[in-house]
Image (spheres, rainbow, N blue to C red):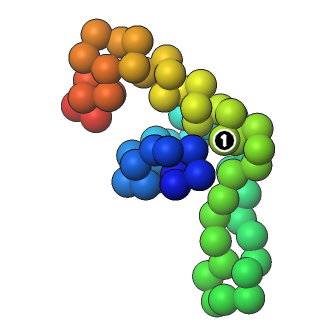
Amino acid sequence: AKSIGENRELIELISSNPDNIDYGEMIHVDDGTEDGITTVTDRGVESLLEFLADVRTWEGGIRQFLA
């Protein structure tokens, strides 16, 4: 979220629904911890940015999406 200038909680909310990001673009990475991390590929970042750009064109924008 920080690298693309977006709110972390918003990105987490968007990515929690697999319909909002292209299939296969969210991946689990073993980082040496018990749980690992979930991240997105470069195409996943593009997908998130495209989704956010689209949502911002809706009447009500992000607030409408969150409702």
Q: Nearer the viewer, residue 8 or 18?
A: 8
Tell me where residue 33 sits by quadrant: bottom right
- In the displayed structure image, the side of residue 41 where residue 61 appears, left or right: left
Secondary structure under tag 1 reads helix
**Residue 16 visible in the picture:** no
- In the displayed structure image, the side of residue 26 where residue 17 appears, left or right: left
- The image shows residue 28, relative to residue 20, as above or below, that is below
Q: Position of residue 1 (x, y in %)?
A: 52, 52
**Residue at the spot x=46%, y=44% of the render?**
6
Query: Given the image, on which type of amino acid does mark 1 rest?
Result: Val
Q: Position of residue 39 (x, y in %)?
A: 66, 59
Q: Nearer the viewer, residue 21 or 63?
A: 63
Q: Position of residue 13 (x, y in %)?
A: 41, 48
| Mark 1 burial class by Cα count in 10 Å: few <14, some 14-19, many 20+ | some
- Quarter of the image for the C terminus: give it: top left
Q: Position of residue 19 (x, y in %)?
A: 56, 34
- For disc 1, the marked residue is 45
**Residue 29 visible in the picture:** yes
